[in-house]
Image: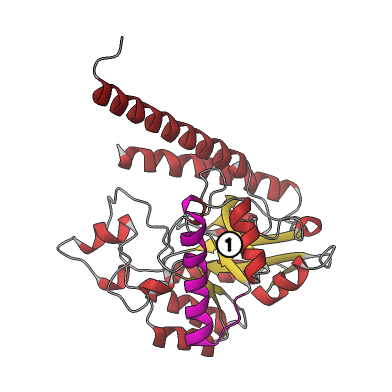
Amino acid sequence: MRWVALRIKRGVFRLSALAGVVMFLLRGRKPKPGLAILCYHRMAENLPTGAPFDPFNVTPKQFSRQLDALQSMPGIKVVSAGEVAKWTGMAKAPEGSYLLVTFDDGYQNTLAAAHQLHARGMKGVFFLTTGYLGRPVFECNLYDQWCRQLPSADPRWYRPLTWEDCQTLLALGMDLQPHGHWHRLVGRLESGEMKEEIVASMAAIEGVLGCKSIAYAYAGGSSYLNHFNPTVEGLLSQIGFQFALSTDAGSNRLSELKANSYHLRRLPVHEQDEGLFFQAKVAGYCGPLPAIKAVAHRLRARFASLLSATATNARGVTKGGKSS
């Protein structure tokens, strides 16, 4: 069942991306003004096929082709976390078409991406789940657990970065920022645990790596599934973060960066994002993807709520005897 849902999801996303390509071509391949934020995760070769979970993977060769496509597009500037942080404090960012390249979780295989970005004079932002750095695997990730149990498992598919790897990323000019300590969905935590999850990640990055924490990427990242909420946003502001990234799909208007600084949208990047599909995405044309993801997540939240209510009612009937 999970495998079928994954195939349907990929098909829908592909059709959405095709709609974005059509608009990109109709507008003469001209980038939209605004800030597009790409969201990568894993960068591994020869992943096993038939997984029941989305690997969120782009191979190093595909990433190289994507960067080639990006560099062939005039008018788009790759920016750093520091530049975005500055703009979120302004009434309006400078006019232009901007791109922020981000990597979630902290996989060791993303070192290949850092080397490629450095060679081209570009920066990327690596959001680290600090509790897992140096461990054998991200136990919180179902795909990683599935990979690790395979007879032919290759640790390069799922191994987290080490602290030494993080020093390499810094030497390559990359930005390192918090993604939580144990990848917990902070919107669903009690206030004490919420603060602990955020502050522990921040303290590890600032204390061990000496990096200033200015940006936070929410684990899960969906506002519709309560992965974060206004309480979390207020806490981040109080602690001193200047912006935060969701996984709600879409690009960001420059005039709205300040108002939405703790709820910036991103565009997921998959292995099928090649050529025009990738160019349309970095140019800010994502078709109906934002609406599709919003509807899908709302339905998922509604379904989860109904299941929870059914389970609660069932427990009540069991405890009190037969209902009338």
Residue 166 covered by magenta stretch: no
Q: Main secondary structure of the magenta part?
A: helix
Task: Identify the residue shown where x is 51% and y is 40%.
Answer: 297
Image position of 161 with respect to 129: above or below: below
Amino acid bearing label 1: Leu
- Between residue 229 and residue 98, name the one nearer to us: 229
Q: Quadrant of the N terminus?
A: top left
Q: Position of residue 66 (x, y in %)?
A: 55, 66
Task: Identify the residue shown where x is 47% and y is 73%.
Answer: 200
Q: Position of residue 7 (x, y in %)?
A: 38, 41
Image position of 21 with respect to 303: above or below: below
Residue matched to label 1:
38
- Between residue 257 and residue 8, name the one nearer to us: 257
Magenta-highlighted residues: 188-213
The answer to whether residue 252 is seen in the rendering is: yes
Q: Is residue 25 left or right of residue 119?
A: right
Task: Identify the residue shown where x is 49% and y is 84%.
Answer: 169
Decide: few, some or many residues near mark 1? Use Cα within 10 Å; few <14, some 14-19, many ≥20: many
- Between residue 237 and residue 59, name the one nearer to us: 237
Q: Secondary structure at mark 1?
A: strand
- Between residue 156 and residue 126, name the one nearer to us: 126
Q: Position of residue 258 (x, y in %)?
A: 77, 61
Q: Residue furthest left?
A: 151
The quarter of the picture where residue 76 lies is bottom right
The answer to whether residue 276 is seen in the rendering is: no
Q: Is residue 80 left or right of residue 322?
A: right
Q: Is residue 187 left or right of residue 308?
A: right
Q: Quadrant of the C terminus?
A: top left
Task: Identify the residue shown where x is 52% and y is 64%.
Answer: 195
Q: Position of residue 276 (x, y in %)?
A: 60, 55
